[in-house]
Amino acid sequence: MKAAEDQVVEDEAGYQDDEESFFQDIDTLQKHGINMADLKKLKSVGICTVKGIQMTTRRALCNIKGLSEAKVDKIKEAAGKMLTNGFLTAFEYSAKRKQVFRVTTGSLEFDKLLGGGMESMAITEAFGEFRTGKTQLSHTLCVTAQLPGEDGYTGGKVIFIDTENTFRPDRLKDIADRFNVDHDAVLDNVLYARAYTSEHQMELLDFVAAKFHEEGGVFKLLIIDSIMALFRVDFSGRGELAERQQKLAQMLSRLQKISEEYNVAVFVTNQMTADPGAGMSFQADPKKPIGGHILAHASTTRISLRKGRGELRIAKIFDSPDMPENEATFAITPGGIADAKE
């Protein structure tokens, strides 16, 4: 019996080790002779892990107030010593991928389409016209991410960044009723921020990184509804397009890094635009998602949503590294996203 108990304790210790190794706190660099004041400066811009330093260019680090080139070189060198940078075999990487979890959408059909749900360490983007269910999907995920799921998924907290003022806590209560969970507990586990400009949206990501770090392993999902709305407003016309795409690329790169650094799922919604040149090419649907190639390449999985009959909506895999192009039908119900009743 004693041996079995020891085994359990050992397993637990192993598990904690796993969590620890998932991200190393930036404070561990003190052992390598980096002083606390410099580490504070890094934290102020949302770099809280050793991996975060590896994910930031020297140039960006030199732009942080109070960090000279010599200091940056020293920090980079210390971080390099702590990380095993280099190559893994595909077998080792597949073991690492076991930490990936999936958040259910509330509809079995939709989950099957995505291979089990919204994947962590990846950006999932859903685009469609208005009234295709993007915001309803976001609200449903706020609740389902908190529920224990398959493959030992324990559930966790959610951060919601709202750019269109469409977040409604009352909706979450209705969805919570469907899953028989306590209203207050559900609302307590969702951190909400309203972004007003594209710069503000970028600044909020620094806060998000700090929060994910502060409560390591507690947050499981980051939702941005919608990713492009503010970029559409802040930059207008062809003249500002290059700058807009550059700022967008920086933000998406930040999102991708946050998702990998802290093992969270990132879900973003996106709007559509009419494509005036499409009439020439006999496309069935002359509308396309905005954000251009930058957003198309940054999203790991892209889902296109369109309206069906009544409350039905159709989701289609538009681009995915591992799922085939398929369609799934789901319904929007008072309790959020659910399977379509035949």
Image: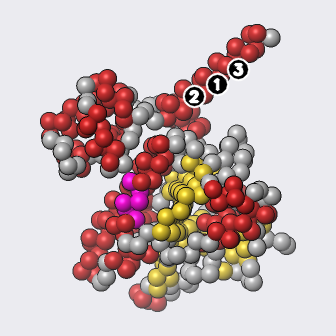
Does dot 2 land on a helix, a strand or a loop?
Answer: helix
Place of residue 106 in the rendered image (x, y in percent of width and height, measured from the top left): 72, 61
Along the line of sight, which residue is nearer the eye, 49 or 261? Answer: 49
Find the residue positioned furthest to the front. 184
Name the residue rendered at 54%, 33% in the picture.
19
Residue 285's image quarter? Answer: bottom right
Instruction: Note whether residue 286 is visible.
Output: yes
Is 16 in front, or is 290?
A: 16
- The residue singled out by tag 1 in the image is 12
Q: CA distance from mark 3 to mark 1?
A: 6 Å
On-image quarter of the N terminus: top right
- Are dots 3 and 1 in contact, CB under 8 Å? yes
Residue at (40, 65) in percent of width and height:
201
Name the residue beneath numbered marker 3. Answer: 8
Which contiguous range is marked in magenta? 201-206
Magenta stretch secondary structure, dominant:
helix
Residue type at numbered disc 1: Glu
Question: In the rendered image, is residue 281 in sight?
Answer: no
Residue 173 is situated, as x and y percent measured from the top left of the image, at 72, 66
Residue kind at label 3, given as amino acid type = Val
Q: Give the x, y percent position of residue 248.
A: 36, 65
Task: Count neighbours of disc 1 (C-alpha within 10 A) and say few if under 14, some if 14 to 19, many if 20 or more.
Answer: few
Q: Left or right: 174 with respect to 258?
A: right
| Residue to which mark 2 is pinned | 16
Residue placed farthest to the top in the image?
A: 2
Q: Check if mark 1's residue and mark 2's residue have beta carbons within 8 Å.
A: yes
User: First in sequence: mark 3 or mark 2?
Assistant: 3
Q: Mark 1: which secondary structure?
A: helix
Residue 126, disc: none
Helix, strand or loop at mark 3: helix
Magenta stretch encompasses residue 45: no
